[in-house]
Amino acid sequence: MKKRLIFLFVFILVVAVYFLQRESLPTYSPSRDYIDLEAELVEQFILAKDSSVIELPAGHFLFSQSLSLDNKSHLTVKGQGMDKTVLSFKGQSSGAEGIKITNSQNIVLEDFAIEDAVGDNLKISDSDSVVMRRIRSAWTGEVSVQNGAYALYPVLSSNVLIEECEAIGSSDAGIYVGQSKNVIIRNNKAFYNVAGIESENSTNVEIYGNEAYENTSGLLIFNLPELTVYGSNVNAHHNKIYNNNLTNFAVKGSIVSAVPKGAGVIIMATKDVKFHNNIIEDHKTVNLAVVSYEIFAADEDELGQETLASEAQARGLRAIESDYKEDESYNPYPGRVSIHDNTFSNANFLPTFSNEFGLLWLLKNKASIPDIAYDGIISPDGSLQDDEHRLCVRNNSNASFVYLDASHDFEGFTSDRTPFDCKLNE
């Protein structure tokens, strides 16, 4: 009888805290005074020559169609500043992207804002040597699942620089780089997105000097299955990632819809990751997690989300793949991850109970939110801390640590970091 009363008390407490923790979604509503120059500006894109500059004037401009550049070289698109030149696709009736650039080289985009495209605000694919500088990419109004997926979206590209930009309101990732190589993401701000910054299946990526806050998750470093390119060698340093506790508003069935709110950083299934000299603060699920793809695939299996996954794919989003093991080239386990010399802190007294991790911390970790969590799921052919799966955690200002032992139903759950106090060859 006593055990039942204790269980009932804990259940009531969790439900009460859950409802107290519910938060409304934020709104981004800048003042706009639109000018009709659509025909003239569309013509500049259509007639643009190689080695030329498209000069965008100051003002707020509405577009009913996408602006496209294909097979261009040494071309600059320049506005008068992200507060002065605003390209809005509110009410767009033709095309999905705001600006779409394909098969191009040596492209510079700088000093303007893009808003409210039906799909992605700025998409660049199959291109080389691309610079995005001082661009604000946003969706206005209350953030919503109806917002486009990606604010800044280079994919299948190389030698990419994203600097001094802002990303706001993406229903997937604000600053996203996918299946690309030789990428620098520096000195940007990302807020009100599901994922603030995301490196997905990309190689030789450096992420530094950024601020990610008030997103569902601040930074994702992911490798996903069933793609032609897999990533490694990601170096994230000197970033400030804080207060990413926004309710997840992603399209159900998409991979980021499984990201729990309050996860500051998630390193998933990626090899050769250096995460150092960052500040990570005030997250309600975990400040940083290192996990395998199996954690995400388990959600798909349990919830039976085939229909939802199809809907996500129809919108051009990566879905949760329960059959990832059929991809023989894909390694779903993280490895050679170094987490060192970071500063962790947390002003939150209790974890969120909006996801299973909050309940796990309650039952296994005295309701304490860990700074660093490792699911401990490794290949059946491997062993904990072998060369392929090594995780090294050191010099992180007394950061708390938990090893979940998730592959054995948390039987070996522990806060002992001794096996992980090591140094990789860097």
Image (tube, rainbow, N blue to C red):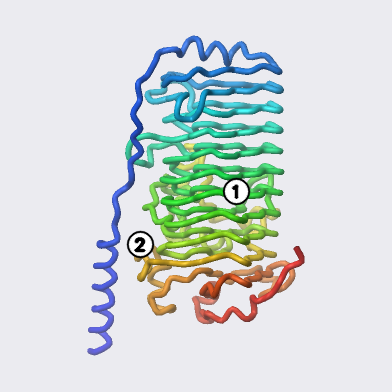
Residue 280 is situated, as x and y percent measured from the top left of the image, at 51, 61
Task: Classify 160 as above or below 13.
Answer: above
Q: Which mark is residue 199?
A: 1
**Is 107 placed left or right of 321 in the picture?**
right
Write down the quadrant of residue 354 in the picture. bottom left
Q: Is residue 231 visible?
A: yes
Q: Position of residue 346 (x, y in %)?
A: 43, 67
The tally of labels here is 2
Amino acid marked by disc 1: Ser
Which is in the foreground here, disc 1 or disc 2?
1
- Classify residue 114 as left or right of residue 395: left
Dot 2 surroundings within 10 Å: few (below 14), some, or many (20 or more)? many
- Asked if residue 404 can be seen in this view, the reply is no
Residue at the (37%, 67%) spot, across then down: 348
Give how far apart the Cα atoms at labels 1 and 2 are.
25 Å
Q: Provide the residue designation for mark 2.
A: 354
